[in-house]
Structure formats: C-alpha cells, structure tokens
Image (cartoon, helix red, strand yellow):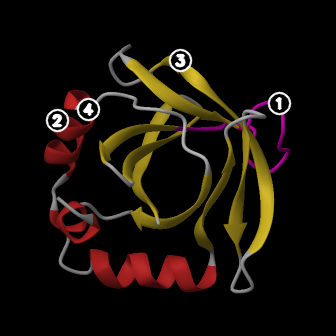
Amino acid sequence: MDVKDLLKMPQADLDALFGRLEAGPIPNGAAKGTAIIAPGHSLNDEIADFVSLFAWQGKEFNAARGFLTNRITPFGLNAIVAMVYKDPSWFDQKECIAIDYSQTSLVAKWVRDEIRLLSKNLYLGKVYWDKRPLMYFALTFS
C-alpha cells in the first residue's frame, strides 16, 4: 500500500486501517507530507498537490529530543513546533505516536496529530482539532 492507495480510500476504510495499525517507532528525520482532506473523492489527488504546493509539505522529526517542526508555505519554512511522544490514541485508546501542539504553538494549540506505522517508510496520520477528527495525512520517509 502506498500514498496513492490512501488517497483513493473512503473515510470508513481509512478509519478501519488506522485502527488496525501499530504505533511503530517514533520516526526521525524529514518526511514528505500528503494531506488526505477529501477521502475517496475523485479530486483528492489534486487537493493534496495544491496543499503541498502552497501550505504544508511535511514534517521534520527529532526523535531524540521528542519534537518536530512542520514544513510550510511554498518556501518550505520549518515552523509550527510540536512535542512528539507515545500516548493512547483519541481514536481507539491503542498506542499511537502523538504530535502535540498544545504547549508549543499559539497557531495550532488546539491541534493534535496521531500517527501509526503503515509500512517501513510510511505512516498514516489523523488530525484532531479540539478533540474532533478533522482529516488524515500520510508521511513518507526516504
């Protein structure tokens, strides 16, 4: 399974997949991000490309220090810091890797991401806004 497959999946299938995955190790290094904003929609590829070009390109993890930065804007600026740690998922209480902005960002303090390992270099992520599920994303490590 790869990112293209994830972009084609409807919401219910993404939920079921996320629920089957294990947390895996906290990643380290740069990951290309792909937003999955309209699960299963025929334009999801184009929406993901637009988001990647103009808003969010991915994340840079520092596993040893337990934090990350997001690569944002068309210029790929590293900004919007988050703490990274293992925690029970808000989705199903199973272990996940939590990406917590509540103590590190004024812009995103109501946001929490959760990721789980899908394959060797691919994580599936779920975004929450104030404990409400918002969208999915994928992180691909080289």
Q: Image point 17% across, 65% down: which residue?
A: 5
Q: Amino acid at mark 4?
A: Leu
Q: Secondary structure at mark 2?
A: helix
Where in the figure is residue 21, as x and y percent of width and height?
26, 32
Q: Earlier in the sequence, mark 3 or mark 1?
A: 3
Residue 78, image quadrant: bottom right
Q: Residues within 10 Å of mark 1 (few under 14, many from 20)?
A: few
Q: Residue 87: which numbered mark, if any?
A: 3
Residue name at image x 32 percent, y 18 percent:
92
Residue at 23% from the left image edge and 71% from the top image edge: 4
Q: Which residue is the site of mark 1? A: 103
- The residue indicated by pointer 2 is 16
Residue 30 in the image: above or below residue 27: below
Q: Is residue 77 left or right of residue 44?
A: right
First along the sequence among labels 3 and 4 = 4
Q: Name which residue lies at 75% across and 85% down.
A: 75
